Image (cartoon, rainbow, N blue to C red):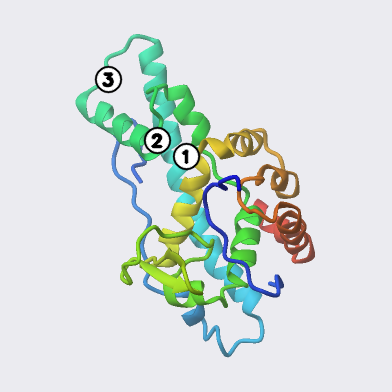
Amino acid sequence: MRKVIILGIFIFTSLSFFVTSNSKTTSYKVEKSSIKIEQAKDFKKSKNKKKIFIETLIPIINEIENGIQKEKVTVKILLAKKINNKKINEKEEKFLDEMLKKYKVKNAKLETLISKMVVPPKSFILGQAAFESGWGRSKLAGEANNLFGMRSFTKDSTKSVKVGKNQYYKRYKNIQDSVEEYILTLARHTSYSDLRKAIGEGKDSVKLIKYLANYSEVKNIYAKRLKTIIINNNLTKYDKK
């Protein structure tokens, strides 16, 4: 069977459910929180879990997106310097090296790096997080802050959580780490190059779904369910926030 890349999905049986900177390359870091979805605003007791789930993730997504945009601006500034044969100092070179490694750009082309520094619309991220974690109610979300079904290649219980007989999924210290790795995974891998291009072209979440061919072995079912979640919950309204 063809090997499917990469995020490794965890779907409920019912299927219902950085270094940013200015030209001085100052560091940017997302403020980490130890809070879990299930702890947020008495999540378990609430009747409006979807609302809490969304309100918990929106500021996290905003923070990460702002950081990536700042990194991207800096890379563009440094690319312009190179094009105009202006000298780049040691700190700036170090920053570029870090970004190239972070996004796994092997040819050292800054144009390629910039094309990878994209973030999907909030509705797209919220939709996948909701689908993969059952709106934060899955075992992965509750025990491991894993909202996107990210697989683990280690059985170390401090780094992974076992689901079923032989499936291991990543364990995160906080929700931010889960969202960050999800976004970075889409940014890094060649399998999502068409998705990144479509994001860069400004296509909406529903149109982006077709570019997730390598996300799941149950492609058509996954795409239909994800589309339903995004539309039925009016998640696109958060793209403007």
Residue of label 1:
188
| SS for dot 1 | helix
Q: Give the mark nearer the N terminus: 3 vs 1.
A: 3
Q: In the rendering, at what x and y percent does residue 23 appear? A: 33, 30
Q: Nearer the viewer, residue 84 or 14?
A: 14
- Disc 1 packing (10 Å; few <14; some 14–19; many ≥20): some
> The residue under label 3 is which amino acid type?
Ile
Q: Secondary structure at mark 3?
A: loop
Picture disc at residue 104? 2
Residue on which disc 3 sits: 88
Q: From this viewpoint, which residue is outermost toward the top?
A: 85
Q: Quadrant of the C terminus?
A: bottom right
> Separation of disc 2 and disc 1 at Cα?
6 Å
Q: Is residue 241 visible?
A: no
Q: Which amino acid, by three-letter code, is at mark 2?
A: Lys
Task: Verify CB contact (< 8 Å) between mark 3 and mark 1.
Answer: no
Of the numbered discs in the image, which one, if any, rests on residue 110?
none
Label 2 near label 3: C-beta < 8 Å? no
Residue type for callout 1 = Arg
Helix, strand or loop at disc 2? Answer: loop
CB under 8 Å between callouts 2 and 1?
yes
Q: Hey, which quadrant is residue 74 in on the image?
A: top left
| For marks 2 and 1 on the same chain, the one whose residue lies earlier in the sequence | 2
Q: Residue at x 34, y 36 (%)?
A: 101
Which residue: 31% across, 12% down?
86
